[in-house]
Amino acid sequence: MEYDTSDWSEASIRFEAEVKAPKKYGEGVFRFGAAMTLSVLLPRRGWKLVKSTKNYAYLKPPEISQENIYTLKAKVPTKEQALEIARHCYGKEESWMGQLGEWPAWYTHKRRRIMNELVPSEDRRTITEKFAYELPPESSLHIGKWGVWELKVVKSDGDFEVHESGEISRYEIPKIDDAQIFEGQELSYELTKYERSSKARQKCIEHHGVKCKVCDVNFEDLYGDIGRGFIHVHHIVPVSHQKGEYQIDPINDLVPVCPNCHSMIHRRNPPYRIEELRAKLRNRF
């Protein structure tokens, strides 16, 4: 499926390394998720691809200043542009998988969504999966990859809805009335990155589980195997509010939350407390 991406806008996208790679991959090598995407995007921007597997990409940053190494610039569509593509796909009534610009993309047309319930036997030794109900079919367009940047356009029983994930800053295009337009000015950006412990995250999940503490969503229940183990971990006191390196208590300082609730928590500064946001959610229904 061919679409013109030349008018997409430039954006600055933040991404994160999961951990430092084992020493066998060499010094200064990092392990990343979103392997199929970052193993393509980062080498184009000076990174060295050391190894790529199904789940991980092992990459070494360029031998230059280490500031802003976790930021990349790429062209992305606006939500209106993504909606236009999704509506066109819906009209064509054909599912497809391919590439849009630098990003992997796929469209699924009217996927059936059958919900089953698990029914235990009388002696409770076996469990049988039984049809419960069927949701309206879902059509969806995905552009990008979770873990870097992703834009998802979804339609079930209403109009299309757009959901975007990832830390992204689109460059605003100023309105210029004059006939002459200039570009190419060199700009510099400063970024402060705070280290997070993967061990602390794992211990938090081992204790609290992977259900969101605000809305109770479990992604495996929603998406099956691809949602197993997926959850954000929220720092009750933001790392940026700490004074330098500090000792963390994974059970009392961290809490699992879904991406939506995590975003809502940080809609103000200081962030909403878990109980406070949970109460707001309950009062909506």
Image: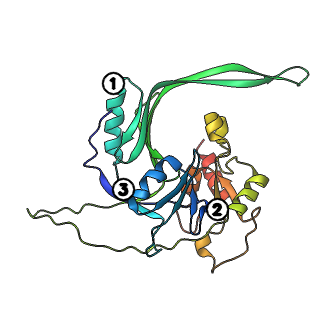
> In this picture, is 226 found above or below 276?
above
Task: Please give the name of the residue rendered at 65% of the width and 43% of the height, measured from the top-left corner.
Answer: 217
Residue lying furthest left:
179
Where is residue 25 shown, x and y percent of the image? Answer: 60, 61
Residue identifier under label 1? 92
Residue identifier under label 3? 74
**Which quarter of the rendered picture does the N terminus lie within?**
top left
The three-letter code of the residue at mark 1 reads Lys
Residue identifier under label 2? 24
Task: Please give the name of the residue rendered at 23% of the width and 63% of the height, measured from the top-left corner.
Answer: 174
With 252 as the anchor, is 181 left or right in this view?
left
Q: Nearer the viewer, residue 140 or 74?
A: 74
Which mark is first along the chain, 1 or 2?
A: 2
> In this picture, is 140 found above or below 136?
below
Mark 2 to mark 3: distance in Å?
Answer: 31 Å
Where is residue 44 shown, x and y percent of the image? Answer: 39, 57
The three-letter code of the residue at mark 2 reads Lys
Q: Does residue 273 appear in this view? A: no
